[in-house]
Amino acid sequence: MKSKKVLALLLTVLLLVGLVAVPASAASYTINKTPTTTKYYDGDTLKLTGLQLKDDKNKNINWKSSDKKFSVTPGNGDVLNLPDGYTEYDITVSVTYDNVFVGTFDVTVYKDGFVSTPTKTAYQEGEMFDPSGVSFYSKSGSGANIVFSLISYPADAGDANLTFVPSIDTPLTKETTEITVKYGTRTIGTVPVTVTAAMDSSTVKKVYTDSDMFNPIGLSLKIGSETVVYPTNKEHFSFTVPTDKTLTVDENSATQNVIVYYDGVEKGNFDITVTHNFEAIVQLEGGTMHGQFCKGCGQLGSVDQCANHVTEWIPNGDAGFLKQESETGTCSICGGKVTRNIPKTDEQLENEFNSYFNLAETTNETEPKILHFFFLIIVRLVQTLIPAGGNGHVFGTGIFQ
């Protein structure tokens, strides 16, 4: 008994002097505020800004990237990924502070892009895109006010932010391979589509003159599972170019576009060319030019001088006193005959004058001047009485200078 009393007394003394420490209870923490952003698109990165803890002394501890006592999984800046097969998923974030587990909170991740795609993706040329069945998540707001809404068609058909390229009222063509879906300025994604030719115009005549009428015989259309052909189903077809009138030439372009309708519904289009129906080149009135005439509208085509296309000129031997000799050639384009004069030099004309009047050369200085003056009078008279022919001139000019 005495030893027990001594031991108790000794322990009391040790406690008083602080040689024996009583273990203190561990600090505790709770999550006072979750981060500002708790909703994300798939592939976004986690942001811990706004996370706040409270310790057991009611002191707030704000998350800072520089505070190494924080341990958060997944961590700030980590990529958030949806598990396969999910369009919306809550990811649990675990928080530890100063090696003490604090707790967890959830962030919600939404699929980025299509939740579902349109039901119809196969079209015939001329049909419009039908977006029925398409859906996706749209994000609005920021920070703690972020809201994700599921947008779908036709439920949200009246939403002006929901648009398609090409638009849903634009006829599809064979060249269309995808439709772009947008919401506001954000591109949601593209929908692959297949557009088959609803019209086959491969056997239709496409080259015409303005003496012809448009004839789309052989044109075929795919109407549902049925193939219809012109003119077998003629009463259902209509065209922007009439089939009962002579074609006319557009002077700005030889190409004309034909739009095809079946029971009033546009099914496609193709181009035709319409040109003038020029006859063979013929010689024009007057015999010195040739040109073309259109049998369809009577328009005169290109015109050219026949003389520009003569390869051989044959003299006609019709030269006379102070009169030029003519020569005739054949136009190699139209076959017309064209005549022109062979110009004479001033020397030839003066020699003819001297010879005709049997004037001999003289050494008298006065006689040449008198003869030359007399020669000029005769030439002027002949010019008045004998007009020049063809395209040449009767006289040269040097002698009169």
Image (cartoon, rainbow, N blue to C red):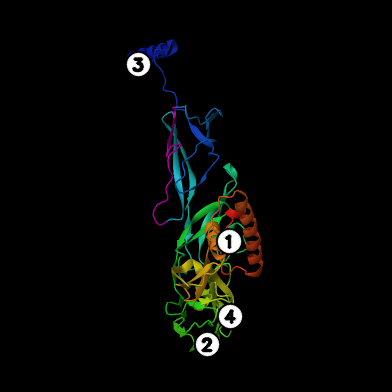
Mark 2 or mark 3: whose residue is earlier in sequence:
3
Which amino acid type is shown beneath numbered disc 2?
Answer: Lys
Question: Horizontal and vertical percent for residue 281?
Answer: 50, 76
Q: Is mark 2 on a helix, strand or loop?
A: helix
Which amino acid type is shown beneath numbered disc 1?
Answer: Phe
Which amino acid type is shown beneath numbered disc 4?
Answer: Gly
Q: Residues within 10 Å of mark 4 (few under 14, many from 20)?
A: few
Residue 279 in the magenta stretch? The answer is no
- Please say if the residues under marks 2 and 4 sit with CB atoms less than 8 Å apart: no
Cα distance in 3D space between marks 1 and 4: 76 Å
Q: Name above or below for residue 212 compared with residue 54.
A: below
Cα distance in 3D space between marks 1 and 2: 74 Å
Question: Horizontal and vertical percent for residue 117?
Answer: 47, 63
Q: Nearer the viewer, mark 3 or mark 4?
A: 4
- In this view, the residue in front, 191 or 194, is 194
Determine if residue 127 is in view: no
Residue 244 relative to residue 219: left or right: right
Q: In which quarter of the image is the N terminus?
A: top left
Q: Disc 3 designates what residue?
A: 4
Mark 2 or mark 4: whose residue is earlier in sequence:
2
Q: Nearer the viewer, mark 2 or mark 4?
A: 2
Cα distance in 3D space between marks 1 and 3: 166 Å
Q: Disc 4 designates what residue?
A: 264
Q: Residue 161 carries which label?
A: none
Q: Disc 1 designates what residue?
A: 395
Q: Residues within 10 Å of mark 3 (few under 14, many from 20)?
A: few
Residue 75 in the magenta stretch? The answer is yes
Q: Disc 2 designates what residue?
A: 234
Mark 1 or mark 4: whose residue is earlier in sequence:
4
